[in-house]
Amino acid sequence: MSPAPSQVLQCWTMDTPYAHLSPTMILDAIESIGLYPSGGLLALNSYENRVYQIEMDDGTFLVGKFYRPERWSNAAILEEHAFTLELEQAEISVVTPISIDEQTLFNHEDFRFSLFRRQGGHPPNLENEDDLEVLARTIGRMHALGRVQSFQHRRGLDVDTMGLASREFLLASPFIPPDIYQAYESTTEHLIDRIAPLFKDLPVQRIHGDCHMGNVLWRDDTPHFVDFDDCVTGPAIQDLWMLLSGERAEQTYQLGIILDAYQEFCEFEVATINLIEPLRTLRIMHHAAWIGRRWQDPAFPLAFPFFEDVRYWSEHLLSLREQMAILDDPPLTYM
């Protein structure tokens, strides 16, 4: 049955955190740390945070990230920064925050922000085996360093956060159409029951966490990793499964290339291959809840206008049911 209106109101909060982030405030924020923009601003394709290309008075460009209020603590953001700086010191190509007076996180008015150098490039070509090997080697190097120590302030990638909390939020929200509600409720319950046991006693470490190809810029035969905003403690396979594409036979072949290259720098727990489809399932569930949680941010209805359509929810339910069937198949193999 559908939730009562009071349950909806308790779970679905109004949130317009960037209402007062004007161009003038952005430029004032940059000047407050002793830098001088020319006035040129270009909003980049980011929803969770607000990210801008900023032209400086000397003609160079920086990228400014204004963090979503109340999402991360200062300690968690600084831990993200420290991780990227560790990677940079190990000569792994990542885009790191600019340090000014030994600080990488700044405050202006009600906003926290950081600055980064502008990195050019294009998404990698995953159909090119050489590029796939380079990507896997780089992630292997990243993970080898990621195991040296643990995050203390950043969240873990787990079923409760990605799956259960997403399900509970959406069931208490006004978004799921009544005709789909019960089917969504039962399907997601079965999925979580199926997936949860696989995440017990996992080897976990510091990982990028959101390693889709929009967060990798390829230039001069080198992958440059950006946007560590979702770096978490989680299984290594989370940063690898999004390199796979195509049918099962193609994915099996790609997985062999990836793991052979990855293990030149970092050991891999082969048993965690069985997490690929569970992780994909959790990502599907979490993505829908993420849009719903941010719906009062005007950027989200503009970017995801289909979210309130019955068709979207029908297709979302279908994708979850397809994942249920895929979970019955044996996992990919690696020899």
Image: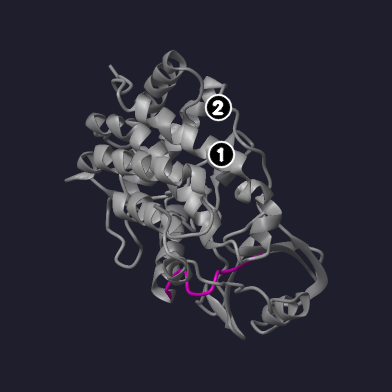
Question: For residue 57, which numbered disc appears in the image?
Answer: none
- Placement of the C terminus among the 4 image quadrants: top left
The range drawn in magenta is 64-73
Q: Does 79 sit above or below residue 226?
A: below
Classify residue 67 by image quadrant: bottom right
What residue lies at 61% left-to-right and 62% top-to-bottom?
A: 116
What residue lies at 44% left-to-right and 75% top-to-bottom?
A: 74
The verdict on residue 302 being magenta is: no
Q: Does 329 sit above or below residue 306?
A: above
Q: Which residue is mark 1?
A: 213
Percent of width and height locating residue 127: 57, 22
Left or right: residue 297 versus residue 210 is right
Q: Amino acid at mark 1?
A: Met
Q: How far is mark 2 from mark 1, CA to CA?
A: 9 Å
Q: Residues within 10 Å of mark 2 (few under 14, many from 20)?
A: some
What residue lies at 33% left-to-right and 21% top-to-bottom?
A: 332
Classify residue 322 by image quadrant: top left
Q: Does 221 sit above or below residue 71?
A: above
Q: Which residue is mark 2?
A: 126
Q: Amino acid at mark 2?
A: Leu
* Number of marks in picture: 2
Q: Nearer the viewer, residue 200 or 284?
A: 284
Left or right: residue 114 versus residue 92 is right
Percent of width and height locating residue 187: 36, 39
Percent of width and height locating residue 75: 39, 73
Percent of width and height locating residue 23: 77, 74
Q: Nearer the viewer, residue 32 or 88?
A: 32
Q: Nearer the viewer, residue 109 or 143?
A: 109
Classify residue 160 by image quadrant: bottom left
* Of the image marks 2 and 1, the number of the one nearer the N terminus: 2
